[in-house]
Image (cartoon, helix red, strand yellow):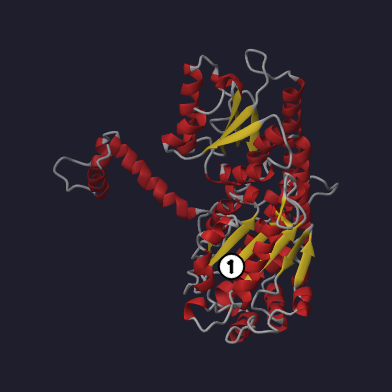
Amino acid sequence: MHLQDFTTYKAVARLSSLAQQPYDLTGGKGLSATRIGRYTCSSCGFDLLYATQRVDDAVLAALQDLADEAGLIAAFQEMKQGAVVNRIDGYASENRQVLHTACRDVFSDAPLEPEASGRAKEELEKLRLFLEKLESGTLTNAQGKPFTTMVQVGIGGSDLGPRAMYLALQGACPSVRSARFIANVDPDDAAEVLSGIDLSRTLFNIVSKSGTTLETLTNEQLVKRALLQAGLDPSRHMIAVTGEGSPMDDPDKYLASFYMFDYIGGRYSATSMVGLVTLGFALGIQPVMEFLAGAHAMDLAAEEPEVTKNLPLLLALLGIWNHNFLGYPSVAVLPYSQPLSRFPAHLQQCDMESNGKSVTRNGSRVCWQTGPIVWGEPGTNGQHAFYQLIHQGTEIVPVEFIGFRKSQYQIDLEVKGTTSQQKLIANMLAQSMALAQGQTSDNPARVFQGNRPNSVLLADQLTPKAMGALLALYENKIAFQGFCWNINSFDQEGVQLGKVLATRLLSLMQGSSASAGGAQEEESTEQALLKQAQVG
């Protein structure tokens, strides 16, 4: 795998030169029908319309050269085959394989990493048998009634991805069972969820790889207390998704256990048991398999060497063009699909925890921009909120729109000649055009400068297979960008310092003399902060 500085690639110098005069999208011919037809990439049921990006053939050729110089396809293939890519050369690090793709490489007779895919198959079989017991009525509550709700208790990757996937698909596969989520250590989060469910017919899915995550274990105790107060046995209402051999891997405490593995990072774990147990409970095993099949198809598509035919690679390189060469610090992901309401929140973690790095895989400080700020909300709500800034503000924000030609529930109504879904898509396309082309006016307040880069990602309908492909598209985009920037996209050292300091503060709240220091010592920073916050 290449461990080369981003700035040393010959294509970087060419792209820097091309960025001095990027393609002009404004004016009559800036967005012609011919350009729209040519600048489209289709894969796994999705069409990426990127004529509204500030690229031309010269830029695309240079981006292809950058991908080739950086060995991005080879790096991606090495990752899928089990190379230890979660590492910093010459320094202490996690030193792990990165094999979330193995979770969906279960449809091949010759998986790329047989051991990891074999484990994934074993866990899928455990899940199938577990769901069979629920369906057949052999697994019920103490009163012989079926469980109707699952509450997933986890945080970070054990919440954001699974929650986003469930919300995205609950309308695609109607079920008698539903899911809720508890993540925040804020007790109001747990209290709100627990007050709105029938505890006697609820299974709690406690998710922690280490089995020691403070927020999750705290919320687990709140759940146990609620169950005991209701006269229920927690061990008959709780299951675990954890690492094999962790403190949570205990059949006396949990009705069932599923395993997660070190080579699957939390933010990449939605296609592992972290996401699939709750998704399977709510939707059934068949939608789970379709979801995995969609992700697997996108993983295969990501191995195409030609940039303009490789959707994840193209999206990654367009992002690099906007971020590193045109100088735009953020990207907005705006789904024109209410079921994807939490998908931008998942991408915030997946992208910013992955590529929010300032050290190369060689251990040196980077001298180029790495991951952008990722944010977003569903349209059309956002049009009445922050779109003013992306159209006319001084900060240019590249946009990635996501839309579907058909609604999920297929409950619609024609009003004034068009359906709601048609209005939704028309709004999305109109925003894309307006950002790109702009508008002239004698009134300066009504001038839209245009040349605001964006792309439109379209599919027919948000099905389990489409959702799997969409998830893998963004996961693979993030990995490609990290490889290109020569950073480790798979560790998360940046979250550790806050955990250490929080532990110190909690120790002080407990009155630990070791942390508080002697009576004559000067008041510590932690003590001063607690004093001002009046906590403890």
> Is any part of residue 352 visible from this angle?
yes
Where in the figure is residue 347, as x and y percent of width and height?
A: 58, 55
Residue drawn at x 46%, y 31% is: 191
Q: Position of residue 140 (x, y in %)?
A: 67, 18
Determine whether 211 is above or below 262 in the image.
above
- Vertical placement of 522 versus 326: above or below? above
- Placement of the N terminus among the 4 image quadrants: bottom right
Q: Nearer the viewer, residue 502 or 343?
A: 343
Above or below 174: residue 403: below
Figure quadrant of the C terminus: top left
- Whole-percent x and y of residue 356? 51, 61
Element under disc 1: loop
Q: Return the residue found at the far right.
A: 109
Residue at 70 percent across and 62 percent down: it is: 457
Left or right for 175, reference 9: right
> How many other residues sit within 10 Å of disc 1, few (<14), some (14-19) or many (≥20)?
many
The answer to whether any part of residue 268 appears in the image is no
Instruction: Write down the residue under mark 1.
Output: 486
Q: Nearer the viewer, residue 503 or 343?
A: 343
User: Dividing the picture into quarters, in which one does residue 148 lie?
Assistant: top right
Horizontal side, residue 327 vs residue 498: left or right: right
State how many labels appear.
1
